[in-house]
Each structure stands twice: as C-alpha cells, then as structure tokens.
C-alpha cells in the first residue's frame, strides 16, 4: 500500500493494561491477536466498507479493521455510536472534543462516510510524521502515524518511544499486531 507494508512493521503488541480489557493473563502480540479474534465476528459486517475505504485512501484494510478493533471493539464498546465519554464518534472514534481533535463527526457511526473521515485523519497523521521524521523508513513512519492518530503528532518524539504518550502506552504496537492478525487470518 502507499503508506507502507503493515506486515513489515515491528511490534511488541498490547501492554498489560490493554490486555486487561479482556482480563487476559498475558500481554504482547498474543494478547493483541486474541483481542482481534474476539472482535472478528462483529468486524465481518463492516468488511465491504473497510475494503472500499482502504482501497480509495491507500490504507491497508487490515489497518482500518485493527483501529476499529482497538477503538470500539468493532462497535461493541459504543453507546449510540459514542465512546470516550461522549468525546469520540463512530467505529474509529473520531475525536470531537474541542480540546482534542476538534473534528465534526461525519456520517452515521458505522457508515462508509465515517470510515472515510477517520481514515483521512490517519493518512494526514502519517504524512505529518513523514515530514517530521524524513529519516525514518516507510514502516516506521506508518507506525508513527498510527501513534499520532491516538495522541497527535506533537506527542511523537522518537521511534524508540513512539507509544510513550499513547493510551495504554502501546497504541501503535497493539494496532499493528491486530492488523497483522486481520491480514493473516481474515484476509483483510
């Protein structure tokens, strides 16, 4: 894909904190894979929208599925489309808080329009990380863009601590591991 190969991105997977969402007795890549698998059945109803948006935006559909899994557990963690205490909208949790992302929600929470908006935000962050860290390889820039999707590009300071400010201290590592699982096991 245009923004790097998700299968070539290094990952340590989910932190202990993130793995406790599912009361797992382990963390790391195995925990990320388990959580992705838990969400896989619900993810199927969004497959065609994910594939369409991924293709049109140049983002691997497996990455979109992984963000949906991490952000909303394929919609299971939302109340009427809202999450994060009413601060985020839809499957990919577009930040509408004026003190956060400040975006205006577009489309229904599970619509193609929403996925296109959120994926556009992701693409913008990948591009910003490319400009900020031109010496990083394409996969490092992709991972940095994923971290920035969670906490903004101003909080990405180095590749070694790319998730230092992210939710759970593992956002990009967890999302990458989930994306690799969706690509390998579900053909996204």
Image: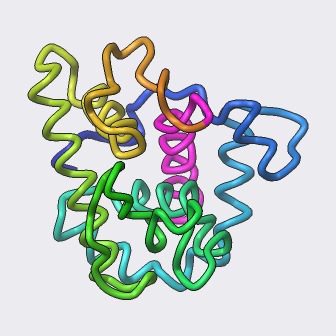
Q: Residue at x 47, y 26 (%)?
A: 165
Identify the residue shown where x is 39% and y is 83%.
48
Q: Residue furthest front?
A: 99
In terms of depth relative to the viewer, which is nearer, 177 or 185? 177
Question: Which quadrant is the C terminus positioned in?
Answer: bottom left
Residue 120: x and y, percent?
A: 21, 61
Whether residue 52 appears in magenta in the rendering, the answer is no
- Left or right: 138, with 181 as reference point: left
Q: Nearer the viewer, residue 177 or 184?
A: 177
Task: Please determine whether, in this image, residue 170 is positioned above or below residue 1.
Answer: above
The front one of 36 and 95 is 95
The image's colouring method is: rainbow
User: Which contiguous range is marked in magenta?
Assistant: 168-187
Query: Magenta stretch: residue 181 in it?
Result: yes
Looking at the image, which residue is at 34% across and 49% down? 99
Query: Looking at the rendering, which quadrant does residue 154 occupy?
Result: top left
Location of residue 159 with respect to 29 vertically, above or below: above
Q: Residue 140 is drawn in which quadrant?
A: top left
Indicate the quadrant where residue 26 lies: top right
Q: Residue at x 21, y 18 (%)?
A: 136
Residue 5 appears at what percent x and percent y?
31, 41
Q: Position of residue 152 (x, y in %)?
A: 31, 38
Q: Is residue 178 above or below residue 46?
A: above
Dominant secondary structure of the magenta stretch? helix
Residue 44 place in picture, x, y as percent: 56, 79
């Amino acid at each position: 894909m245009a923004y790097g190969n998700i299968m070539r991105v290094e990952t340590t997977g989910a932190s202990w904190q993130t793995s406790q969402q599912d009361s797992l007795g382990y963390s790391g890549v195995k925990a990320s894979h388990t959580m992705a698998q838990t969400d896989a059945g619900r993810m199927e109803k969004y497959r065609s929208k994910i594939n369409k948006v991924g293709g049109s935006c140049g983002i691997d559909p497996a990455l979109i599925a992984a963000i949906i899994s991490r952000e909303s557990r394929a919609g299971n963690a939302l109340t009427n489309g809202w999450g994060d205490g009413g601060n985020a909208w839809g499957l990919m949790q577009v930040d509408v808080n004026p003190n956060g992302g400040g975006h205006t929600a577009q489309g229904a929470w599970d619509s193609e329009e929403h996925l296109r908006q959120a994926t556009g935000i992701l693409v913008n962050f990948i591009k910003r990380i490319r400009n900020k860290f031109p010496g990083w390889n394409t996969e490092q820039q992709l991972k940095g863009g994923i971290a920035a999707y969670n906490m903004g590009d101003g909080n990405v300071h180095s590749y070694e601590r790319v998730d230092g400010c992210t939710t759970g201290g593992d956002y990009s590592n967890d999302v990458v591991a989930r994306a690799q699982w969706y690509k390998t096991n579900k053909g996204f």
